[in-house]
Image (cartoon, rainbow, N blue to C red):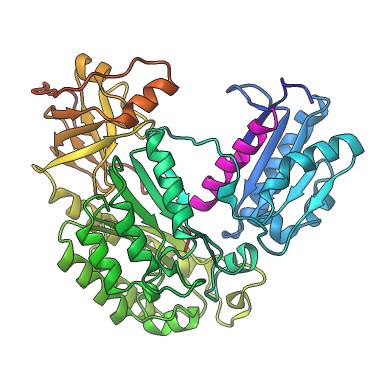
Amino acid sequence: MSQSRTYEVRTYGCQMNVHDSERLSGLLEDAGYARAAEGTTADVVVFNTCAVRENADNRLYGNLGHLRPVKDSHPGMQIAVGGCLAQKDRGEIVRRAPWVDVVFGTHNIGSLPVLLERARVQREAQVEIEESLSAFPSTLPSRRESAYAAWVAISVGCNNTCTFCIVPSLRGKEKDRRPGDILAEVRALVAEGVAEVTLLGQNVNAYGSEFGDRQAFSKLLRACGEVEGLERVRFTSPHPRDFTDDVIEAMAETPNVMPQLHMPLQSGSSRVLKAMRRSYRRERYLGILAKVREAMPEAAITTDIIVGFPGETEADFTETLEVVREARFAAAFTFQYSKRPGTPAADMPDQLPKEVVQERYERLLELQERISWEENQKLVGREVELLVAEGEGRKDGERRRLSGRAPDNRLVHFAVDDSAAQRLRPGDLATVEVTYAAPHHLVADSGVRAVRPTRAGDAWAARNGRAPQAPGVLLGMPKVGVPEPLPAAADGCAID
């Protein structure tokens, strides 16, 4: 195969898919492909798909349709489809889009280079779907998208049976990595300059169930705290059923585990939670939040909520609003219920009309926007240390700002002068004072109070051809810029 063949990976869905795409990129580069330059047509286009939302199918087949004439005009071009939708649709993909060359599932991403070569030689589509995981994906090569932050998968699959969720049938039963393998990967990443790791799993705090240690997750958090040079540890997404006191204690007592928790609620109605098979009730959920805030008063808690689950009444929805008011989430990813064929909820009676779901969704969004703004306003005047990020602020350049993440994962846009802009790199740590709050971000326009260069910043500089930063402290930056207008509401997709 020519060394000049290029690739592009297009990713849809959750953090697990993003991490899988890093593996797919690593596999392709290991096989001799090069990432296609922006604005060019790649020789291989890989779709890493999601099947969680109702429009996932239409989105994929629409994109494949747009790509067909491009392929026709580029002899030798190949198209591959993987991920959850590929696991679900299998041979249906090449039936509906016969110009696709390769279809592979969630359990055999390591097969992609071989399947591409086989399709090229045999001149026919290759469809290979495995029913279970043969090797943990973290054994595969990876092309990490960030020099300073990394995903670390600790488990794959899920043992839950939520009636709305198709993930367990596509990702399989939970499989846990051994703690030693996880910590070895974390240490290797830190040695390369990574400052922040996010432990990743479909049900991350159920970690250890496969090998019979119910405290394995809290032990893992504490062990991460002993990795020298690891500045920040996060995890996503936990399940309330498995959120035990030892995890809260480990979070509070391990300095580099960040005071941030994303824990899906899904509904504030215990009746709806039972219909969802969520295995906890609103009292249990609110009790966990109370314990977390008692141990970590500064913790920012975010969540996922589904509106319009089959049979949800106005009284049920009112209970969800009540929980949102009491929980005071920093942010919430809110979704309108999406029927997925193959899930029990898809066949439930009392499917709600679209207009009812939409009206409830807008009410929930309005309430959460107000709460997010009020919670963010409490931080005005507070100093925070930010991990400087890359590409988080679309208007940073014109407003002479950089962006970073606070320990609680809030996004902060902060003003810099020319000196600070030249010295600060993604991965460095900057101390700023919050001067303005919006629902989805904070602004710090009073100047950078201090800078702590890091090995993560050095790693970013090395990747981008910049010289390492000499250690030092930067003080007294002048104020630049004006407060930003309120942004539009955000949407997102979480794992659990």
Residue 313 as seen in the image, left or right of residue 321: right
Place of residue 278 in the rendered image (x, y in percent of width and height, measured from the top left)? 45, 77
Residue 223 occupies quadrant: bottom left
- Quarter of the picture containing the N terminus is top right
Q: Position of residue 459 (x, y in %)?
A: 38, 27
Q: Is residue 100 visible?
A: no
Q: Is residue 82 left or right of residue 220?
A: right
Q: Is residue 87 left or right of residue 339?
A: right
> Please, is residue 371 above or below residue 119 in the view?
below
Task: Provide residue 422's location: percent of width, then percent of height.
Answer: 27, 16
Does 179 appear above or below 424?
below
Q: How many callouts does the rendering have? A: 0
Question: In this image, 24 relative to 304: left or right?
Answer: right
Depth order, front residue of 221/320: 221
State whether residue 496 is above or below residue 195.
Answer: below
Residue pictured at 32% horizontal, 42% vertical: 487
Judging depth in this view, the residue of 444 and 368 nearest the camera is: 444
Stretch in magenta: 10-32
Q: Report if residue 415 lies within the magenta region.
A: no
The verdict on residue 31 being magenta is yes
When asked about the image quadrant of residue 253, the answer is bottom left
Residue at x 69% of width, y 44% of height: 62
Residue at point 55% right, 49% down?
138
Can residue 376 be seen at all in this image of the molecule?
yes
